[in-house]
Amino acid sequence: MSTHHEPPPPAPRTDGLPWTAGDALLAVGAAVLDLLGYTVGGPDGSRPVALTALVLLVLAAMPLLTRRRYPLASLAVVLVLGLALNLSGPVPHHFNCTLCVALFAVARSRGLAVAAPAGLAAVAVPLVGPGHPLPPPVGDVAANVLAAALVILAAEVLKRWQQEVEVRRRLLADRAVAQERRRIARELHDIVAHHITTMQLMAGGARANLGRDTEVVRDALVTLEGSGRMALREMRQLLDVLRAGDALEEADGVPAAPQPGVGHLEGLVEESRRAGLPTEFAVLGEERPLPPSTGLAVFRIVQESLTNTRKHAGPAQARVLLTYHPDRVTVEVSDNGAAVPADALVGALAGAGGAAAPGAGRSGYGLIGMRERVALQGGSLVAGGVDGGGFRVVASLPVAPAGGEERLG
């Protein structure tokens, strides 16, 4: 047994009127059509038009102004005024425009259990009045029944269609929320994994040099402080995104910092050097502005790759190569560190639809996150061991050609 949920009434207008301009236009249009239908040729084709009938036709359309908020009451008033019109003199006994609109509003807002009796009442009222034979002709009854059935059917079809649209809208909204959660989780992983790893290494270096080399300890503590400050700033950016639209954020008044991009790679490489990983950085090709999303993806790939190198490669050297091509940008991060069994990486990337080079690998959510970033940009990612030891990550991201319309700063 299906249940019917009535839609909530429309929000009240700020000017105090319980109807909208569209409701007023609909009521006027229904009244005009009914007046035209009544006056053309007179009520029975020969008699003059009665002023009382004209007034009642106009009054019968007025309840349509409140049909959204009070559909049953509006239909009841329309039926009462229609009965009064029939009793005032001979009129055509058929569905007029006002009655169709009022019945449609009831069928839209109520279930069939209410719409069916309302339709029967709408069928019967136009057949009552002087000059109408009893019982009414079968043809007149059949015409009114067909008209009522079509009105109710149209309302049901529209209602089902709107429900399906609402379901699809909610599914799309849920999917968007899930994607946003994944993006935030990926950002948090990148921030925490990189900065906390750097802070851990710097804290260990400072502890190992206590009482021996104060300059090394001071540099380590400065790097530790900078990494902590950067982590807090980036995590605050994510929290600001989650709190978008909140009055607390508006009261804060602090503008969000721009997302990191390729312009921040030198600072990232310098931080890696201070953390104890000798890192080279080179740029090939003609540099040009990249879309913010592409620049952020490049930055996060380099950040995660250098973090993995410091965590898993042992004593090693790293190299970051950024290459600008006419229609894409390629970033490569490689090291000559110790190889780690590739089983975990192959399983993780294969399950996520990525590519893993044979030989050696490093597992974890970071590689999966890099693959997802590249997939969102429509690019490709290869990660795996290299001959002679070490590890390499290569990501290729499509971008608009230099001078193209889609070029962004």
Image (spheres, helix red, strand yellow):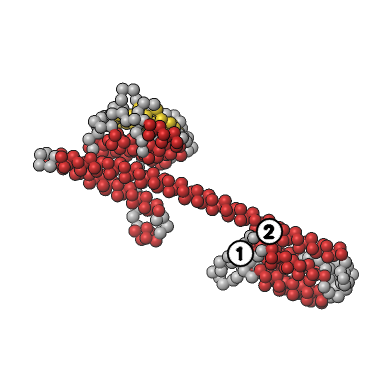
Kindly identify which residue carries mark 1: 6
Residue at figure coordinates x 42%, y 45% from the top left: 183
Give the structural element (helix, strand or loop) at label 2: helix
Residue 153, horizontal then vertical, whole percent: 72, 58
Residue 331, horizontal then vertical, whole percent: 37, 32
Label 1 amino acid? Glu
Give the image quarter of residue 220. top left
Kindly check if marks 2 and 1 are in contact, taking CB atoms under 8 A apart as contact. no
Of 30 and 383, nearer the camera is 383
Give the structural element (helix, strand or loop) at label 1: loop
Kindly identify which residue carries mark 2: 156
Q: Residues within 10 Å of mark 1 (few under 14, many from 20)?
A: few
Residue at figure coordinates x 56%, y 70% from the top left: 15
Q: Is residue 357 left or right of residue 141?
A: left
Give the image quarter of residue 361. top left
Q: Is residue 76 left or right of residue 268?
A: right
Residue 82 can be seen, yes or no? yes
